Amino acid sequence: MLEVKQISVSYGLAPALWEVSLSVRDGKIVAIVGSNGAGKSTLMKAISGLIHPGEGTIEFDQRRIDHLPPHQVARMGIAHVPEGRRIFPHLTVIENLKMGVLPIKGQKRAQEILNNVFNLFPILAERQRQLGGTLSGGQQQMLAIGRGLMSDPKILLLDEPSLGLAPIIVDMVFEVITRLNSQGQTILLVEQNAFLSLEVAQYAYVLEVGRIVLEGEATKLIDDPHIKKAYLGE
Amino acid sequence: MLIDGLLIGGLIIVVGIGFSLCFGVMHIVDFAVGEWVMLGAYTGFILVRYFGHDPMIYLPLVFLIFCALGWAIYPLIYRAVSGKRHNPVLMGLVFTFGLSILAKGGALSVWGYHIQSITTWLSGKSLALGPLTIPALRFSGFLFGILITLLLMLFLYKTRLGITIRATAQDREMANLLGTDVRKVGALVYSLYAGVTGMSGILIGALFSIHAAMGVKYCTLAFFVVVLAGMGYVPGVIIAGLILGLLQSFVGVYIGGRYNLVALFMVMYGVLLITPKGILRRGI
Ligand SMILES: Nc1ncnc2c1ncn2[C@@H]1O[C@H](COP(=O)(O)OP(=O)(O)O)[C@@H](O)[C@H]1O
Ligand SMILES: [Mg+2]
């Protein structure tokens, strides 16, 4: 479904990604793990069109998307939930969610998805009229994911959904990720928290200073000695 | 005098809201804001001279004309502020400064130094409100300001498009990621702003007088409004517009009209020194 082929990205003269390739199959959770500054967010931005790779190609449903602007990538069915949640602080919860709806989707479908989002995160239904900026970090993360889902995406890109959250909330977010996947949602998940993401993912890539150094079935990577040493703190 | 200040405030608010939205959404500080007022005033003047009737009936037409002008000019401004420029805000400032000089120069060569005025059936009339008498024209300028502000607020807070505009002003990149064509939103905002500002020009022209350099004052006022309100915060603009209207007539009456700008500058410097983000600094 998503094929990243040999992309290189640099910020001005500073390279951030070298010849990175990855693929995500329909219905899977694929994780990218790597420490701070490895280039995970850069990879997500390249997929969603916020930055354009200097070399290589990105294909989505057999169509090249690496030259498209973000709003066109979004309309093709890629929802990027960026690092730091990026809630519109002065819009209410419901307005934030409505911003996630693509103009091309029908009203009825939008209502269905909204119900599903409220099902996943009942707290959002309770706080519909509250301003986004006044929510707690955990609630903002739920809102960010919910807003991403409103576009009924073919693939959901989650960048560090556990960052800065209390352990109980992290568990809850990961439960939702698993639940979404069991409903058929394809997810590309970026995490510093390697253990959690390898537990929910089926396949994973390890990114180190801009290069993919390891990839494989998530269950195998958990037992990989290098991973254990570098990311699982054992 | 208090009333007088509030009445002028209505028009300042209208000019200020558009100006502030432009910055919020596109990060364009439009130096040509005063020239939109000036061109609007001249357009009203010409319409009245050639077609007669009261200038008030041309408000909607002038709105449409300036919406179209704004829409036509926007791609140029967009080019100036986007791409790989190092300092887009500065580029926008320089570009619109150029536009403003062009418009001023053009107006000067067409109409010269003569000061023109627009008269409407309201000119010279006044309303009795209890013990107060209020000039009817000023009052209608105020009503116009309130009405346009209310319409803009309704649009910005109650429609999907308005919410998209506010979201774009709050986080342009995020709005883009959610499928919003932020360039189109910018074109819409700029066009709306040009239309509203040009339309206010008629009333301002009728209230005061029309000449090529009249825009400077409104450019200054628009800047002051956003300094007071913080860029892009609509309710702040309303309060700031009223404060500035009051300040203007206060200085005009007690100190003398020619100290108006000096007083405004002093207040602005004061505000900037005390609270760099504007006294009412909040979001959109
Ligand atoms: N906007 C930017 N401009 C310049 N360099 C950047 C920018 N964003 C990220 N970088 C650099 O690119 C590298 C990868 O960053 P990032 O993709 O954010 O890593 P991660 O998400 O894995 O923590 C880092 O060295 C970072 O300093
Ligand atoms: Mg990151």
Image (cartoon, coloured by chain):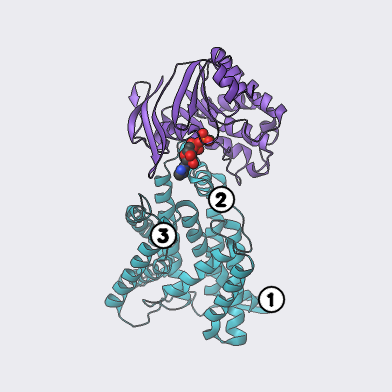
In three-dimensional space, the C-alpha distance between marks 3 and 1, rounded to whole angstroms, equals 38 Å
**Could you tell me which secondary element the residue under label 2 belongs to?**
helix
Q: Amino acid at mark 3?
A: Ala
Chain ID, purple in image? A
**Could you tell me which secondary element the residue under label 1 belongs to?**
loop
Which residue is disc 2 drawn over? B154
Which residue is disc 1 drawn over? B130
Q: Amino acid at mark 2?
A: Leu
Which residue is disc 3 drawn over? B194
User: How many numbered circles does the render carry?
Assistant: 3
Q: Nearer the viewer, residue A9 or A224?
A: A224
In three-dimensional space, the C-alpha distance between marks 2 and 1, rounded to whole angstroms, equals 32 Å
The picture quadrant where one finds residue A140 is: top right
Disc 2 residue crowd, few under 14, some 14–19, many 20+, Cα 10 Å:
few
Q: Colour of chain B?
A: cyan
**Camera-nearest label, 3 or 2:** 3
Check the picture and name the quadrant holding the N terminus of chain A: top left
